[in-house]
Image (cartoon, grey):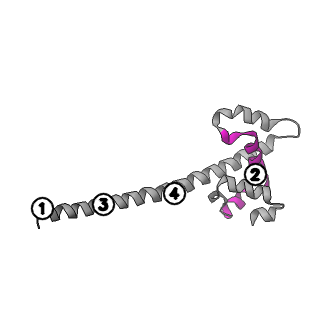
Amino acid sequence: MNQETKVNILEKDYLDDLNKIKQTIKSNQAQAMVIVNRTMILTYYQIGKIINQRKKWGNKFIERLSIDLKDYGKGYSFDNLSRMARFAMELTKKEIVAQGVPQIPWGKIIAILQKSRSHEEIIW
């Protein structure tokens, strides 16, 4: 086997390994996104449960909370906290996990809540 053939074989092996590594990265990034999304959806549910325990008509709990959480980012705006409260009011944790809700992006969950007229429609 001459030197050029050895280099070509090594180059092919290298390119095969490079492609395997790229696929591994891509696959694991997708898995990580699913895990992160699941964790965030369950976090939003927990926040919603806390809000629902404390909010009362006229006490401006959500408004104050959104101001106090402003350093944590856009996700904790008044509108989003209100959506978290509704999400926790409409569904139980058991329904969320059983229906695969944690695999759905938060924006789609909000759309489902806004367009649904009943609990059955939300679950469907």
From the image, which quarter does the N terminus lie in? bottom left
Callouts 1 and 4 close, C-beta under 8 Å: no
Say which element carries label 3. helix
Q: Amino acid at mark 1?
A: Gln
Q: Separation of disc 1 and disc 3 at Cα?
A: 18 Å
| Label whose residue precedes the other's in the sequence (3 or 4) | 3
Residue at the farthest left position: 2
Q: Amino acid at mark 4?
A: Ala
Closer to the chain start, of discs 2 and 1, is 1
Q: Tell me which residue sits at (88%, 40%) in the image.
A: 57
Label 4: which residue? 30
Q: Which residue is mark 2?
A: 88
Provide the residue span drawn in magenta: 74-98
Q: Would residue 51 be visible to someone looking at this image?
A: yes
Q: Residue at x 69, y 56 (%)?
A: 108
Residue at image point 26% right, 63% down? 12
Q: Nearer the viewer, mark 2 or mark 3?
A: 3
In the rendered view, would you say 61 is above or below 83? above
At label 2, which amino acid type do we have? Ala
Residue denoted by label 1: 3
- Front disc: 2 or 4: 4
On residue 14, the disc is: none
